[in-house]
Image (tube, helix red, strand yellow):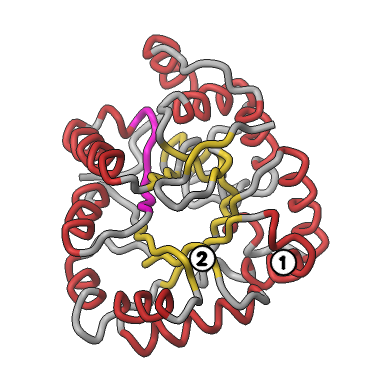
């Protein structure tokens, strides 16, 4: 079973490995239901999806009829204006077949123009705050991708006290001096304030090349169990953060298996060897 830890100040103890709902955005309900059984087997008790993840919310909806109490349920809106975000939030609730979620997040809020709109008087944040006041969600968060994410999350937290953040983190990114520094600053801020830190892209090998894409991930992932073990263990070795699983149902069992067997964080020497042997490279370009 995968261990649990406090999800910030929410009062919920989430498994340190959260299920990333993007993995079931393009699968049948039958396949999605098999994923649910896998989650239950490993004790995963936190689902993270989004309105933009294809049919993910529709696939999760039937689970909620029997298993709503088994999961901390999170979704996201990528809209930037009040009216559009409000409409998408209600659509998500309908698709998920619930009257409320536990966590509602402003999705991929890293570009300054998007940020300005979302935080404007008629922006998406107003819709999210209103949803919480109406009991449609208990908590609010912010997510992002790319090398500006950590810095933009700190900017967001200075404007509003979100309950969680989500951003990329892996061994390769830890070697990006500016991003690593800003990630650690953000982590310190979140730890001080009791804000949950979720990470994505743990098993990134690098960007896709000219080869055929054989996995449902927008990056070329590590796919050997021994490498996934190291990548996952490196993340879980940071005691105060969470790991969101990958967006590929074929790799999901390997990630969950690695998380369930987590013992200790690999050394930098072990990680450097994996980088060399697997020819890992930077995903983001400055």
The 10 Å Cα crowd at callout 2, few under 14, some 14 to 19, many 20 or more, is many
The correct choice, above or below, for 252 with respect to 149 in the image is: above
Q: Across the whole image, how many numbered discs are drawn on residues?
A: 2
* SS assignment at label 2: strand
Locate the N terminus by quadrant: top right
Give the residue at mark 2.
75
What residue lies at 37% left-to-right and 60% top-to-bottom?
141
Spot occupied by residue 99 in the image (x, y as percentages of width and height): 61, 78
Q: Looking at the image, can residue 212 be seen?
A: no
Determine the residue positioned at 34% across, 56% down.
144
Quickly name the residue at label 1. 64
Residue 166 colored in magenta in the image: yes
Give the quarter of the image for residue 209.
top left
Identify the magenta region. Answer: 164-172
Foreground: 210 or 175?
A: 175
| Image quadrant in which you'd find residue 81 | bottom left
> Tag 1's secondary structure?
helix
> Who comes first in sequence, dot 1 or dot 2?
1
Query: Which residue occupies 43% across, 28% down?
Result: 239
Mark 1 neighbour density, 10 Å: few (under 14) some (14–19) many (20 or more): some
Q: Is residue 217 magenta?
A: no
Q: Residue at x 23, y 42 (%)?
A: 189
Task: Judge by depth and name the residue closer to the eye, 222 or 94.
Answer: 94
Identify the mark at residue 263; answer none if there is no mark. none
Residue found at the far front of this picture: 11
């Amino acid at each position: 079973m995968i261990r649990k830890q406090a999800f910030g100040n929410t009062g919920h103890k989430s498994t340190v490995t959260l299920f990333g709902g993007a993995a079931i955005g393009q699968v049948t309900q039958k396949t999605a239901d098999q994923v649910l059984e896998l989650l239950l087997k490993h004790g995963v008790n936190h689902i993270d999806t989004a309105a933009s993840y294809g049919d993910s919310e529709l696939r999760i909806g039937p689970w909620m009829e029997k298993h709503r109490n088994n999961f901390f349920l999170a979704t996201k809106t990528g809209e930037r204006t009040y009216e559009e975000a409000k409409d998408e939030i209600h659509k998500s609730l309908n698709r998920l077949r619930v009257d409320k979620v536990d966590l509602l997040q402003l999705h991929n809020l890293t570009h300054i123009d998007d940020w300005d709109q979302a935080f404007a008087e008629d922006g998406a944040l107003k819709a999210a705050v209103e949803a919480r006041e109406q009991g449609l969600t208990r908590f609010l968060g912010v997510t992002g991708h790319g090398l500006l994410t950590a810095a933009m999350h700190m900017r967001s937290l200075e404007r509003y006290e979100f309950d969680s953040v989500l951003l990329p983190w892996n061994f390769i990114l830890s070697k990006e001096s500016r991003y690593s520094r800003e990630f650690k600053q953000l982590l310190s801020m979140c730890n001080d304030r009791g804000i949950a830190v979720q990470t994505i892209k743990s098993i990134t090998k690098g960007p896709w090349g000219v080869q055929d894409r054989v996995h449902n991930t927008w990056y070329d992932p590590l796919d050997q169990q021994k490498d996934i073990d190291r990548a996952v263990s490196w993340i879980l070795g940071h005691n105060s953060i969470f790991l969101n699983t990958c967006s590929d149902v074929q790799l999901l069992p390997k990630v969950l298996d690695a998380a369930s067997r987590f013992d200790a964080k690999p050394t930098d020497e072990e990680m450097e060897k994996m980088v060399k042997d697997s020819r890992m490279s930077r995903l983001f370009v400055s």
